[in-house]
Amino acid sequence: MIETNHITYESLLLGNKNWVEKTLQENPDYFEKLASGQKPPILWIGCSDSRVPANQVTGTLPGEIFVHRNIANVIAHNDLNMLSVLDYAVNVLKVNHVIINGHYGCGGVAAAMSDKQFGLIDNWLRNIKDVYRIHKEEVDAIQDEEAKIKRMVDLNVIEGVHKLSATAIVQNAWAKGQDLQLHGWVLDLNTGLIKDLEVSCTSNVSFDKVFKIA
Ligand code: ZN
């Protein structure tokens, strides 16, 4: 586990000052540029887990990725927070890529696959149990417990991409000819490497009629 005993709220403020100093040494007009606006080409939807920060794991900087994170990178159609981020990203920032990034070792997915009560969060984790219901046959056929949960991490991302593609926000963008690609990725905490699940989606052409709303 990462050692965090040295982290206090004061140390964060000191860390911020050091970062500003270092950044200005390397690039004196950095904050002038940063303050003048943003045009990130990517929306990242990831897990709140402290080990998967969008910028660090992709080697990107402030201003380069628009980010939404929640427990287990769940896509829920009634999540006004996620929908607002998606709407702003697609219709105002006009991002070209939306990436759902899951990660192996996800506590949210593991909790959803258990038979225990965790309190309020059970309502959120229910979305992941729904993913299991859809893919029960495949998941139940996996004997190894760890492999089973890993596959559920994949499937939670894959279903998330499908749910995103079913939103009016995404389909209206495609109908207008906007260049918008949806992707599903998973990061392996054991290696730090990201795997592309190759479920990218660029139009609703192949969708069943009920999912084709634009
Ligand atoms: Zn997680």
Image: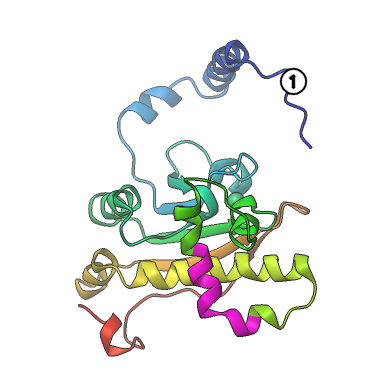
Q: Main secondary structure of the magenta part?
A: helix
Closer to us: 34 or 196:
196
Q: Position of residue 12 (x, y in %)?
A: 58, 17
Closer to us: 123 or 201:
123
Give the class, few, some or many, for how many residues have Cα within 10 Å of label 1's Cα (few <14, many ≥20).
Answer: few
Residue displayed at 33% across by 53% down: 79
Residue 141 appears in the figure: yes
Left or right? Give the position of 161 relative to 155.
left
Closer to us: 41 or 33:
41
Q: Position of residue 127 (x, y in %)?
A: 46, 63
Residue at image mark 1: 5
Image quadrant in which the C terminus is located: bottom left
Residue 196 appears in the figure: no
Residue bounds of the magenta highlight: 128-138
Q: Is residue 157 magenta?
A: no
Q: Position of residue 1 (x, y in %)?
A: 79, 37
Amino acid bearing label 1: Asn
Left or right? Give the position of 61 relative to 165.
right
Closer to us: 178 or 14:
14
Q: Is 23 drawn above or below residue 191 in the view shown?
A: above
Residue displayed at 55% across by 42% down: 55
Q: Position of residue 128 (x, y in %)?
A: 52, 64
Image mark count: 1
